[in-house]
């Protein structure tokens, strides 16, 4: 397959397989001056045909990438990008075509390799990897198999790359670690850890979310700009390289950071909660010059996010009651840009913050949340949730850990806590870690060097632990527990008992009475279980109005409960050809009894209106009775 591609790999595991293609273009042109990033693109795109379904959209066609596709693309990108040689900045694109996903311990059982061309770094312009599912079973892991296939296709292509890279997924079920668990097992896992590494036991990528107990397992922008017009393209690039070199030397040799802090110091923190009284919950969290506004919005359970059937078959969560949306507007950095919806960066940062917070929100809490953040927004989001009255199991904070190495001098590395934008730009690592006082809840590793050693990982975890504890202490001074009572603007969720024999009164005729109550009170009514209905009201006053209307409606047609086989007294009200109308004691209206349900035993004046009868009751509803042993008296 894909014979014309620069590199192509078919990776299979059991009944699952992935096609990954790597394509590049050649050019004699040179990269633009100052370009220090690798022009490399990964596209992961799932397919309805992979699970034997037709797309459910109007056109019945495969459309653009979903959020899950974009997040998978970012994971693969972050795993492969660190191993491109430094100084090579020609454009690259990687494409993966997913046939099936793995369901066993080994991520790749059989690999078919197809490649063409020779290594030539001088003429590369664009490299792309694309992954598209062609066949996926119920237990497969498309992202894991796709990552391994992508690394293989890049490795066998003509692209200069210092691979290979391999990845595994680790789950934690009942205190035991499981390597590459299937989807069924992952549903019961307390941790989801995706780990990619290269040779010499170096780690290049970490993506994790889980309960805070998993910690024991882990044991601003560039300010300096060269504007001297005397510089030509080459001299300007050399000047930037010298600046980065000096930046690293100052930190490694003198522990000197550009803002005067020590390598473990955290920027000054300012916190404000309940910023706007009308909002359900809000906070303003500022760390240094990084400022995050977080808001919490409550809505009815019906507003929960439901993924489509195809995404569910491919492993997406069926229902999300807790959602976090991240926005990074252009005015935050004093720039002008066109608003075109969420980009990959916003989706990735929002997903990370959501992972960090979702494990401390009680599962039985009947609301959803909408926030705005990255690592600082994990802190702001936690404060906003407490301000809204959400009973979090613990507060959560996040911090970004950096790494600076000086390979030329072969000196020890330095791990930085709470990195600035320039330290992210000129440093070698951006390790975002979030957690509570009990442990980590989410982490995301992005490195620029060919992997981290175990010592560097361990030091990063310790720095993150100290930083998170410091931030949590600052947060607890202002708010350490949830608001005791919700604000008046917060909607109210309640339930009301509704016996099965009364349910038809409220929901018959297409829910006519229920819709009338909703229209009059603006309260949403929904089924909760066999004996209860749920009520979602904009405030307590509207809730009480809705309950009063429902109670009044049910009392007009209230019917007593009868036990199976109970002897009941009734009076014959009217006779019809098909049966008789009986008036039961305590029942508001007559109930029809068909002839087929009457006892065959002759009784005195069975057709006489007003006759008092006794019968054994088997079933009663608004439609009729099921009786036996009917007798007059």
Image: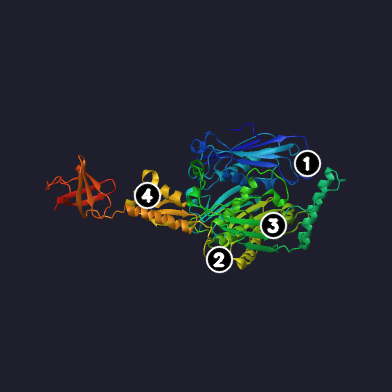
Q: Specify which label sits upstream in the sequence, 3 or 4.
A: 3
Residue located beneath label 4 in the image: 506
- With 190 as the anchor, is 39 left or right in this view? right
Q: Residue at x 66, y 34 (%)?
A: 116
Task: Estimate how packed mark 1 is, as few (under 14), some (14 to 19) or many (20 or more) residues with alpha carbons within 10 Å.
Answer: few
Identify the residue at the far bottom of this view: 477
Residue located beneath label 2 in the image: 481
Q: Nearer the viewer, residue 101 or 294?
A: 294
Q: Specify which label sits upstream in the sequence, 2 or 1.
A: 1
- Provide the secondary structure element on which disc 2 rests: loop
Horizontal and vertical percent for residue 582?
A: 22, 48
Residue located beneath label 1 in the image: 32
Horizontal and vertical percent for residue 55?
A: 51, 36
Residue located beneath label 3 in the image: 290
Q: Nearer the viewer, residue 380 or 436?
A: 380
Which of labels 1 and 4 is toward the front? 4
Q: Nearer the viewer, residue 617 or 9?
A: 617
- Provide the secondary structure element on which disc 3 rests: strand
Which of labels 1 and 3 is toward the front? 3
């Amino acid at each position: 397959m894909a014979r014309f591609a620069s590199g192509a790999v078919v990776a299979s595991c059991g009944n699952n397989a992935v096609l990954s293609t790597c394509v590049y273009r050649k050019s004699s042109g040179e990269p633009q001056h100052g370009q220090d990033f690798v022009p490399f693109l990964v596209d992961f795109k799932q397919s309805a045909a992979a699970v034997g379904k037709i797309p459910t959209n109007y056109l019945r066609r495969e459309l653009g990438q979903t959020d899950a596709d974009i997040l998978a693309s970012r994971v693969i990108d972050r795993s492969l990008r660190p191993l491109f040689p430094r100084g090579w900045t020609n454009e690259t694109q990687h494409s993966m075509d997913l046939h099936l996903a793995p369901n066993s311990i080994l991520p790749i059982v059989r690999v078919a390799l197809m490649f063409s061309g020779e290594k030539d770094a001088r003429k590369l312009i664009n490299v792309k990897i694309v992954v598209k599912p062609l066949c996926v079973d119920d237990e497969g892991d498309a992202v894991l198999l796709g990552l391994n296939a992508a690394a293989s296709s890049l490795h066998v292509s003509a692209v200069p790359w210092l691979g290979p890279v391999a990845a595994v997924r680790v789950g934690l079920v009942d205190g035991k670690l499981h390597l590459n668990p299937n989807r069924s097992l992952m549903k019961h896992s307390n941790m989801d850890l995706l780990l990619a590494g290269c040779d010499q036991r170096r780690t290049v990528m970490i993506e994790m979310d889980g309960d805070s107990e998993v910690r024991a397992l882990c044991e601003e922008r560039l300010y300096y700009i060269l504007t001297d017009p005397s510089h030509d393209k080459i001299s300007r690039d050399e000047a930037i390289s010298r600046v980065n070199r000096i930046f690293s030397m100052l930190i490694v040799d003198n522990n000197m950071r550009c803002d005067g802090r020590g390598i473990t110091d955290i920027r000054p923190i300012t916190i404000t909660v309940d910023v706007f009284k009308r909002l359900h919950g809000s906070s303003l969290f500022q760390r240094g010059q990084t400022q995050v506004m977080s808001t919490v919005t409550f809505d009815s359970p019906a507003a929960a996010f439901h993924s489509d059937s195809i995404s569910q078959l491919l492993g997406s969560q069926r229902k999300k009651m807790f959602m976090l949306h991240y926005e990074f507007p252009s005015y935050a950095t004093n720039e002008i840009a066109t608003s075109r919806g969420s980009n990959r960066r916003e989706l990735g940062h929002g997903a990370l913050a959501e992972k960090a917070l979702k494990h401390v929100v009680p599962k039985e809490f009947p609301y959803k949340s909408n926030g705005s953040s990255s690592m600082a927004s994990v802190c702001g989001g936690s404060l906003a949730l407490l301000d809204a009255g959400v009973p979090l199991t613990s507060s959560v904070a996040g911090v970004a850990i950096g790494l600076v190495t000086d390979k030329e001098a072969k000196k020890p590395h330095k791990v930085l806590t709470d990195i600035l934008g320039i330290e992210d730009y000129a440093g070698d690592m951006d390790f975002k870690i979030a957690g509570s006082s009990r442990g980590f809840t989410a982490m995301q590793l992005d490195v620029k060097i060919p992997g981290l050693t175990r010592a560097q990982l361990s030091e990063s975890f310790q720095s993150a632990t100290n930083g998170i504890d410091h931030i949590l202490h600052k947060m607890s001074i202002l708010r350490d527990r949830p608001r005791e009572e919700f604000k008046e603007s917060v909607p109210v969720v309640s339930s009301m008992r509704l016996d099965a024999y009364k349910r038809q009164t409220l929901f018959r005729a297409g829910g006519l009475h229920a819709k009338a109550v909703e229209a009059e009170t603006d309260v949403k009514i929904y089924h909760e279980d066999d004996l209860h209905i749920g009520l979602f009201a904009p405030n307590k006053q509207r809730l009480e109005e809705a309950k009063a209307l429902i109670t009044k409606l049910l009392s007009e047609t209230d019917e007593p409960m009868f036990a199976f086989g109970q002897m009941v007294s009734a009076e014959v009200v009217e006779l019809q050809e098909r049966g008789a109308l009986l008036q039961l004691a305590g029942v508001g209206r007559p109930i029809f009894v068909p002839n087929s349900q009457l006892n065959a035993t002759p009784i005195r004046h069975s057709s006489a209106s007003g006759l008092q009868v006794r019968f054994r009751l088997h079933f009663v509803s608004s439609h009729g009775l099921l009786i036996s042993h009917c007798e007059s008296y």
